[in-house]
């Protein structure tokens, strides 16, 4: 499965992506807001991504993990997750991590919009939500730019390397998505 935008390609995570994902998680700027912390060895990253890869190849995928690449030269940009909730609630949670050399180029915004399109139009979701550390200004800007609404502020819920962090909760509904596309 591949999703494409003007400048990006999102494809399902594979075992051949291990080194790129490990290298991404070893970047201190990326790890700053990562609840996984910096992996010391490649085998730690392998332990984390092996179930994510397996989930991508089940008959019914409930936890999609994508690699984000530039469309033309297939340069690794980052990773993106879409985890479906219980069918009854018809919702999902998103998360993403981009290499800092690709920050401030609109790639996160483009990838989130692509996942919204996939989630609302293909999977027929009703609601997509995300969370981010309150000091993660880059993600706050992205989530608000794509039309997500800040619905909450959870106190000291994220175990980061720097200590417990508050978390902003964001969401967008299928009706919001449709209305935003009209504008």
Image: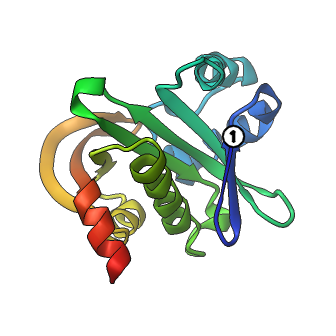
- Residue 173 seen in the figure: no
Indicate whether 168 appears above or below 154: below
Q: Residue at x 50, y 50 (%)?
A: 118
- Residue 180: quadrant of the picture: bottom left
Which residue bears the numbered disc 1? 1
Name the outermost residue toward the bottom. Answer: 183
Q: Residue at x 70, y 70 (%)?
A: 7
Residue 6 at x, y = what percent?
67, 72
- Residue 50: quadrant of the picture: top right
Is 71 left, or right, of 131 in this rendering? right
Indicate whether 113 appears above or below 127: below
The residue nearer to you, when weighing 50 against 9, is: 9
Q: Residue at x 64, y 16 (%)?
A: 47
* Colouring used for the render: rainbow
Mark 1 Cα-neighbour bin, 10 Å: few <14, some 14–19, many ≥20? few
Indicate whether 153 appears above or below 164: below
Indicate whether 171 appears above or below 87: below
Element under label 1?
Answer: loop
Number of numbered discs on residues: 1
Q: Residue at x 87, y 63 (%)?
A: 73
The residue nearer to you, when weighing 24 against 12, is: 12
């Amino acid at each position: 499965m591949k999703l494409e935008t003007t400048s990006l390609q999102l494809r399902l995570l594979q075992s051949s992506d291990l080194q790129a994902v490990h290298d991404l998680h070893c970047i201190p700027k990326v790890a700053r807001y990562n609840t996984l912390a910096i992996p010391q060895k490649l085998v730690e990253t392998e332990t984390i991504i092996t179930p994510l890869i397996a989930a991508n190849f089940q008959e019914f995928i409930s936890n999609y993990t994508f690699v984000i690449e530039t469309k033309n030269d297939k340069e690794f940009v980052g990773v993106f997750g879409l985890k479906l909730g219980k069918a009854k609630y018809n919702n999902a949670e998103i998360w993403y991590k981009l290499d800092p050399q690709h920050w401030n180029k609109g790639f996160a915004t483009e990838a989130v919009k692509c996942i919204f399109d996939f989630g609302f139009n293909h999977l027929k979701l009703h609601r997509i939500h995300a969370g981010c550390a309150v000091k993660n200004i880059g993600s706050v800007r992205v989530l608000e730019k794509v039309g997500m609404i800040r619905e909450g502020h959870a106190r000291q819920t994220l175990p980061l390397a720097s200590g417990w962090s508050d978390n902003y909760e964001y969401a967008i509904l299928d009706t919001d998505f449709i209305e935003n596309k009209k504008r």
